[in-house]
Image (spheres, helix red, strand yellow):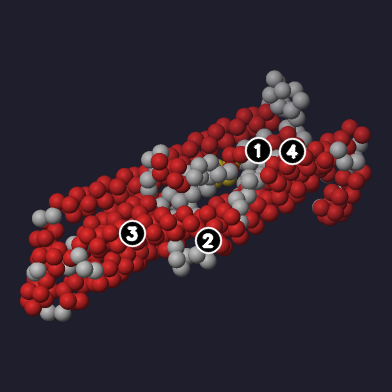
Amino acid sequence: MRYFNVILFEWKHFIKSPFKIIGVVLFIICGVYGLHNGANLYTKQNSEINKLNQKAELEKKTILGFYDNNQKGPLTRPWVDITKPLWAIRNVPTYHYKKPSPNIVYSTGQTEQYGFYKKIRLYSSPYDADMTKEIANPERIQFGALDFSFTILYLLPLLLLILLYDIKGSEAEQGFLPLILVQTGVKQWWMLSRVTFYVILSMIIILVLMFYGSTLTEVFKTPLTFWNIFVWIILYLFLWVTIYFIILYFGKNTISNTFQMMGLWLIFSFIIPASIYQWISIEQPVNLMTNIIDTKRGKKDQIYKELASTSDIELLQLYPKLKQTERTITTANIKNLRANSKIAFANVALKTAITNAETNNLRRNKLISKTYGINPLTFFQAKLNQLTSTDYNSYKTYRDDIQQLIDIRINTLISDTWNTTKINKTKYIDYNKSLHK
């Protein structure tokens, strides 16, 4: 009964406070806006993927038509010969996608920073221009790309501040606190009961918003992920509630409590993350991809100027199985054979440069992870990104898959060129199956 009276008192206090009601309404509006941003991104990416698949099918039908009509290629491009491995493989439309998770509605993470599809070519790499970082998160926010995770991580602590700032302080200032304590008993119990009311209110708001988000995408295809996200958000909620409760318990008045809450919010939300980012930038500077650029420009030229005999030796070292194959080399095709083989050397050089870039990124991420103890906002952001498949590791897996497809493409070219394989319709259809992941 005593607890019910406190809850009833707090409810009456809440509905009579326009400031708190406005705070709740604004939080809900921002949450809904962020959910729709995530859902729109999900819809947009899936729509683009469907268009690219249709385009690939159309390109495939065009090439199959050439085989049916005994053509070597389009009449306007007489140098194209799709009966040869090089041109047949170049005309296999292969796209690889980073398909958006339905849970992207809750956190867009790095989704808008990186490309989500890649057309695989013989000269492609996971760090081509269409795969590199495009825009930083603060700039995305300025352009209105506010997502649900931003609402939770940055605005939820402000909502709690608005809901809790006057607990105990206003009563103490008006001289009512001793009377309230006589009626309700222990101060800790009375404060905890009032804080609990707002914790429950916040949890209900968050859960309702998340259920609303689930109606915008197919979130419940993976229901466990939905509840995992909810649990991590609630843990984040309790972190801030604990911090604010300590301030309220030891605080003397409303103004002092409010300034302390606001100060800690600024420290944990901006000052600490910014300081750590600055330290990381000094300790482990951002990789400017200069090695990859230099490799694409200089190393390729060097490879193509190498002596043919040296290239043959290196090729057999790179592909030992070629020694076991039978090949018929004629003066007419030896030039193409060696030229195509050098694509493999360029790919090896690029992979070495890419490995260095990835190693640099992993060092930065490891340094960041060591700061989670004093940087909880970044920790919870990383957890939400991980659960929505929008984190760095998800995109690294995507890049690794792209590199694997490039390797398969080049290996197939080398093998079939080395064995002077003639490509017909059946072989081209096999290419369309084997060169995809």
Q: Is residue 337 left or right of residue 215?
A: right
- Asked if one can make out residue 186 in the rendered structure from this viewpoint, the answer is yes
- Point out the image quarter for the N terminus: bottom left
Tell me the element at label 3: helix
Q: Earlier in the sequence, mark 4 or mark 3?
A: 3
Instruction: Count residues near mark 4 (Cα–Cα under 10 Å), then give few for <14, some for 14-19, many for 20+.
Output: few
Front of the two marks 3 and 2: 3
Examine the rendered structure and indicate whether residue 331 appears above or below residue 430. above
- Asked if one can make out residue 414 in the rendered structure from this viewpoint, the answer is no
Q: Residue at x 19, y 49 (%)?
A: 22
Question: Residue 263, which numbered label?
Answer: 3
Report the Cα–Cα distance between label 2 and label 4: 33 Å
Residue 134, percent from left and from top: 53, 41
Instruction: Count residues near mark 3 (Cα–Cα under 10 Å), then give few for <14, some for 14-19, many for 20+.
Output: few
Residue 209, percent from left and from top: 28, 53
Q: Is residue 90 left or right of residue 135?
A: right
Residue on which the image places disc 2: 368
Residue on which the image places disc 4: 297
Q: Amino acid at mark 3?
A: Gly
Report the Cα–Cα distance between label 3 and label 1: 58 Å
Instruction: Look at the numbered discs 2 and 4 and tell me whether their residues touch, using CB distance below 8 Å.
Output: no
Instruction: Look at the numbered discs 1 and 4 and tell me whether their residues touch, using CB distance below 8 Å.
Output: no
Q: Amino acid at mark 4?
A: Arg
Q: Earlier in the sequence, mark 3 or mark 2?
A: 3
Residue on which the image places disc 1: 92
Residue 62, percent from left and from top: 62, 29
Q: Is residue 322 left or right of residue 98?
A: right
